[in-house]
Amino acid sequence: MLYALITVLGLIIGSFLNAVIFRLKAGEQFVTGHSKCPACGHLLGFFDLIPVFSFIFLRGKCRYCRKPIDWQYPMVEVVTALVFAIGFYSIIGNQMLSAIDWRIIFEYFTYLIFSCFLIIIFVYDLRYYLILDKVSLTALVIAFLLNYLLGASIVNLLISALLIGGFFLLQFVVSRGKWIGGGDIRLGLVMGAMLGWPIGVVALGLAYIIGAIVGLLLIAFKKKALNSQLPFGTFLTLTTWACLLWGQKILNWYLDKVI
Ligand SMILES: [Zn+2]
């Protein structure tokens, strides 16, 4: 029952994240303004905006202009719901709800906020090859704040952020902006502030491993030419999210089995 509730909440928040992504792209203020069809501009009503279900009932088309609705909308909703449910399982699990532990609830809340930022950055970078400063810098401030409230050491977060951000800055300078974008430097800071030292570096290493594997697979299946760019921010956000939940386990496994 609780999982159903969390999943529904995830769908609703996912729908909100879609709206944020769309309005960031359109350059509107997302706090105000009603939802509109991106194709015809028709204002959308309550029944057009039910996550996933509207997409299914409308058979993927706008009710007013019959233009196809972007697949991004149901995908982000489903992914957000999964992220909410997996996090709940992983952080709270089957603990007795009679003995509510506010610290763990706050930890889960922090995970949800971080995940929402990561989903926005992931989708935006995947589609537009861009990481917006207003998103990454807001995430950076919130990451420091929430982790501090959870008892993390600011020095630890700073070291991790400067290490990863500095690593990208170095590549940026050496390659004169060819290997890495300025957005990745800011994202590096966010990774460090969200995960701290040493987990931030675990996420960084994983991003390179997964990026290399996916890159090789795409070349093998001839989906992308060797020289074309995969947005690296998508790998960084993916592994940062994974390390929010399993970073310590991955690190322990690595220290135990590999070294
Ligand atoms: Zn329309």
Image (cartoon, rainbow, N blue to C red):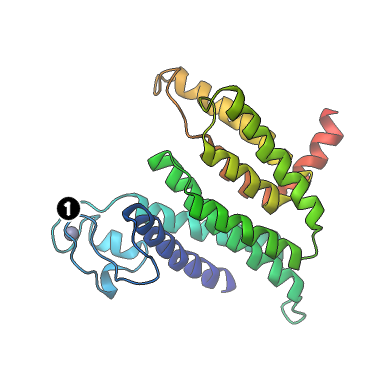
Please name the amino acid that badge 1 sits on. Lys
Q: Quadrant of the C terminus?
A: top right
**Is the distance from the Cβ of mark 1 to the nearest ligand 1 atom less than 8 Å?**
yes
> Which quadrant of the render holds ligand 1?
bottom left
Please tell me how many numbered marks the rendered image carries.
1
| Residue 188 rendering spot, x and y as whole percentages | 63, 42
Is residue 93 among the parts visible in the rendering?
no
Horizontally, is 164 left or right of 49 in the view?
right
Is residue 71 among the parts visible in the rendering?
yes
Q: Is residue 201 above or below residue 123?
A: above
Residue at the image point whose x is 69% and y is 47% from the top: 192
| Residue 54 rendering spot, x and y as whole percentages | 29, 64
Judged from the image, the secondary structure of the residue bearing numbered disc 1 is loop
Residue at the image point whose x is 46% and y is 19% from the top: 219
| Residue 124 rendering spot, x and y as whole percentages | 43, 47
Q: Quadrant of the N terminus?
A: bottom right
In this view, the residue in front, 179 or 86, is 179
User: Which residue is identified by label 1?
Assistant: 67
Residue at the image point whose x is 45% and y is 61% from the top: 14
Q: Is residue 1 above or below residue 129?
A: below
In this view, the residue in front, 216 or 33, is 33
Q: Residues within 10 Å of mark 1 (few under 14, many from 20)?
A: some
**Quarter of the rendering containing residue 139:** bottom right
Horizontally, is 28 left or right of 255 in the view?
left
